[in-house]
Amino acid sequence: MAKLEFRGKTYTGEDEIRATLAAAGILFERWPLRGAASADEQVLSLYKPEVDRLMQERGYVAVDMVALRPSTPGLAEISARYDKEHHHVDDEVRFTVEGEGVFEIEGPDGGFLKFTATPGDLIVIPAYRRHLFYLTSASTIRCIRLFQDRGGWEALYEKIVN
């Protein structure tokens, strides 16, 4: 189950995580786990109803899968691209199918929310929201990703100054 750490408190209940993230403008949902599937196409098929709903509701146009494991070539270099504070011009949408990872997300007051995603967790980090991501000690995560642009997005490290 997901875990959220914020302002010295740790939340593990689904409702309290959802409410705390919602207050910060971050969508959190729990989707039912539907068994193990090996091929990405099988996983996408298992979660098609939820993915289609999210695409329709939020205007996403592309979906894919990403998997990181200890055996992933260049895992350290891949991880290093996202473990520093950055943002994207598109929402960052992740549904965790396997493994776990940590998102540290800037909250409305400048403090950071530390969210540990586990299988069944969907999180939507709004476009332009500063965050970083890293794997837990298991070094494994497999996620469905959704995008508002078919080209995906890139990590932008410079802060936006108003």
Image (cartoon, rainbow, N blue to C red):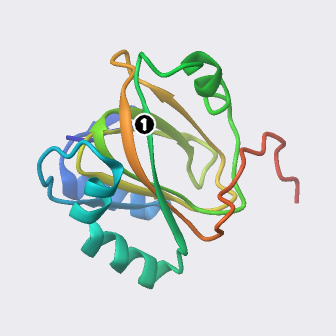
| Outermost residue to the bottom | 56
| Quarter holding residue 55 | bottom left
Picture residue at 30% right of the left edge, 46% below the top: 39
* Crowd class of label 1 (few under 14; some 14 to 19; many from 20; radius 10 Å): some
| Outermost residue to the left | 35
Residue closest to the eye, 49 or 136: 49
Find residue 98 and report its horizontal and vertical position in percent. Answer: 27, 38
Residue type at tag 1: Ala
Q: Is residue 41 left or right of residue 108?
A: left
Picture residue at 64% right of the left edge, 45% below the top: 110
The correct choice, above or below, for 135 with respect to 120 in the image is above
Residue closest to the eye, 14 or 48: 48
Residue closest to the eye, 78 or 137: 78
| Outermost residue to the right | 162
Find residue 70 and report its horizontal and vertical position in percent. Answer: 41, 16
Q: Is residue 97 left or right of residue 106?
A: left
- Residue 119 visible within the image: yes
Q: Is residue 151 left or right of residue 69?
A: right
Please identify the quadrant where the N terminus is shown.
top left
Picture residue at 36% right of the left edge, 77% below the top: 52
Find residue 144 and report its horizontal and vertical position in percent. Answer: 40, 53
> How many numbered discs sit on the rendered protein?
1
Find residue 137 and report its horizontal and vertical position in percent. Answer: 37, 15
The correct choice, above or below, for 109 with respect to 27 in the image is above
Mark 1: secondary structure: strand
- Residue 7 visible within the image: no
Picture residue at 21% right of the left edge, 62% below the top: 46
Please identify the quadrant where the C terminus is shown.
bottom right
The residue tagged 1 is 67
